[in-house]
């Protein structure tokens, strides 16, 4: 059909409305035309958690959840994981095309020029408590970068956007490594720009007294692939956050800090941390049935399983499982892998998981590799945030330059009190037997 439409009959009035269908969607503002009386607000769509609402048109990432497909700018994730590097993939995501050899050289140079942080950033990190969660340090420090780079507020200037993109991609590993060293009470290691993006990151994390750190090439490559797998994932919770905060024209550091905060939740990018805690708690294979029983009784969730979009398998989880073997050849096997494999096997044969279409997601195996590589669990979401920075910047810029976008301002369905009038404090009735404010009903 050339111009597909949808016809809606309002049974309250008998009126019919023809609504255009474009790209498989109707424009929700068309619904506002459907009203009983001319002076009323009109129909809205109700979609808590945006389960079935497209909030933007995007060219960055594509997911087909039923077929287990993920592509960045059209390129299958499997090809990028096998043949690309994180910095090349970041270029692809940010700029829209793979670089030519000379552009790639320039891009690498430009990112490396921004790996150092201002000494005051270092002092800022030193101010955190010794046991501060590194994700909290990352969120706070990235937010603080806007005070170091006030030019970032020039969001409509392409040169400024490019500069902040290079700075963010360049500095994320440095801030992450400093957060780790802080938690260990170790002196910070400054960037070594002779090394690759992930090689330098490993150096800033793990270099001790040696004059030059030489990363293990297998681990360096494994981390690079993990970063590729985490670089973008279209409109997930943190990408939606970067777009939402950015829609107020906040600077990109503030928007990315907010996105990282969203990523830090256990239902999103910190699920990898929760998986390790869960596998450690299981302890050995014979305890798996007990965990499965708890999950099926809805006492807890199986962390690292399930996805809003993937209902077949998460292609990233497949690739990660393969990387695990290469990493374990260097580091020795992480015993948690056996529990994880058995847990996956049992779950995938169980009717609850099959009928709910619950499969391992990216976080199920990534933590096991990170742990084998020597990362403490608290660092897992931080690693995710480093990789996702390129995706966040691409989503942010796409939102900013999209003429159809405005400041995000959803509607609500108000179910609270109708108008009521203020009663002076002295005449308000005390609730019998409730002397303390915390005992009053309410969520807070
Ligand atoms: N374990 C057990 N049951 C689950 C799980 C799980 N991990 N995930 C979903 N379900 C069940 C729910 O109980 C629900 O069952 P019901 O319909 O019988 O009530 C059904 O599956 C649908 O669950 P929702 O919560 O509605 O699914 P949603 O799409 O909102 O959630 C999410 C997706 C948050 C990822 C969920 O699967 C989950 O909590 N997984 C565990 C946490 C996790 O691994 N998060 C990482 C996701 S990947 C990422 O963010 C990088």
Image: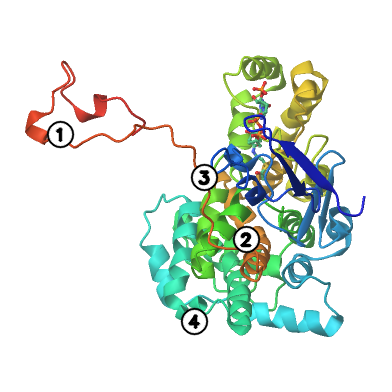
The numbered dot on residue 41 is: 3
Q: Residue shown at 63%/69% (left/top)? A: 169
Query: Which mark lies nearer to you, 1 or 2?
Result: 1
- 123 shown above or below 361: below
Residue 25 screen position, x and y as percent: 76, 48
Tell me how far mark 4 sits from mark 1, CA to CA. 49 Å
Tell me how far mark 4 sits from mark 2, CA to CA. 22 Å
Q: Is residue 271 left or right of residue 140?
A: right
- 63 shown above or below 137: above
Q: Is residue 130 left or right of residue 62?
A: left
Q: Tag 3, which secondary structure? A: loop
Residue 110 screen position, x and y as percent: 67, 82
Q: Which residue is mark 1?
A: 423
Tell me how far mark 3 sits from mark 1, CA to CA. 31 Å
Q: Residue shown at 56%/40% (left/top)? A: 266
| Quarter of the image with the C terminus in it | top left
Q: Which residue is mark 2?
A: 386
Q: Is residue 297 left or right of residue 350?
A: left
- 376 shown above or below 417: below
- 79 shown above or below 304: below
Circles 3, 1 touching at the beta carbon (< 8 Å): no
The numbered dot on residue 286 is: none
């Amino acid at each position: 059909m050339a111009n597909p439409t949808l016809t809606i009959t309002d049974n309250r009035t008998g009126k019919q409305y023809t609504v255009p269908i474009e790209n498989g969607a109707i424009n929700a503002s068309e619904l506002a035309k459907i009203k009983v009386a001319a002076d009323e607000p009109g129909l809205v769509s109700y979609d808590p958690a945006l389960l079935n609402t497209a909030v933007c048109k995007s060219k960055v990432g594509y997911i087909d959840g039923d077929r287990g497909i993920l592509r960045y700018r059209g390129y299958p994730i499997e090809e990028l994981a096998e043949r690309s590097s994180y910095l090349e993939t970041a270029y692809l995501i940010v700029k829209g095309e793979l670089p030519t050899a000379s552009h790639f050289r320039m891009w690498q140079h430009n990112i490396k020029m921004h790996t150092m942080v201002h000494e005051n950033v270092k002092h800022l990190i030193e101010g955190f408590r010794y046991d501060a969660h590194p994700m909290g340090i990352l969120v706070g420090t990235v937010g603080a970068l806007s005070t170091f780079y006030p030019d970032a507020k020039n969001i409509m200037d392409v040169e400024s956007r490019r500069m902040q993109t290079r700075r963010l991609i360049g500095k994320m590993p440095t801030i992450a490594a400093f957060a780790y060293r802080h938690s260990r009470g170790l002196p910070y290691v400054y960037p070594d720009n002779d090394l690759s993006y992930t090689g330098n990151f490993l150096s800033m994390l793990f270099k001790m007294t040696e004059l030059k750190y030489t990363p293990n090439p297998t681990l360096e490559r494994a981390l690079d692939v993990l970063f590729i797998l985490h670089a973008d994932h279209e409109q997930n919770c943190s990408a939606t956050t970067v777009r939402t905060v950015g829609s107020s024209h906040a600077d990109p550091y503030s928007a990315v800090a907010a996105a990282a905060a969203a990523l830090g939740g256990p239902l999103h990018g910190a699920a990898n941390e929760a998986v390790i805690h869960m596998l450690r708690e299981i302890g050995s294979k014979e305890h798996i049935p007990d965990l499965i029983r708890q999950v099926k009784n809805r006492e807890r969730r199986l962390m690292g399983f399930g996805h809003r979009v993937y209902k077949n398998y998460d292609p990233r989880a497949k690739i990660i499982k393969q990387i695990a073997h290469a990493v374990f050849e260097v580091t020795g096997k992480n015993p948690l892998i056996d529990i994880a494999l058995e847990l996956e096997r049992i779950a995938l044969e169980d009717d609850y998981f099959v009928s709910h279409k619950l499969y391992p997601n990216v976080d199920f195996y990534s933590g096991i590799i990170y742990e084998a590589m020597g990362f403490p669990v608290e660092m897992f979401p931080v690693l995710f945030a480093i990789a996702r920075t390129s995706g966040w910047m691409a989503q942010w810029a796409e939102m900013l330059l999209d003429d159809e976008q405005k400041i995000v301002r959803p509607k609500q369905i108000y179910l609270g009190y109708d108008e009521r009038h203020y009663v002076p404090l002295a005449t308000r009735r005390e609730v019998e037997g409730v002397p303390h404010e915390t005992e009053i009903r309410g969520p807070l």
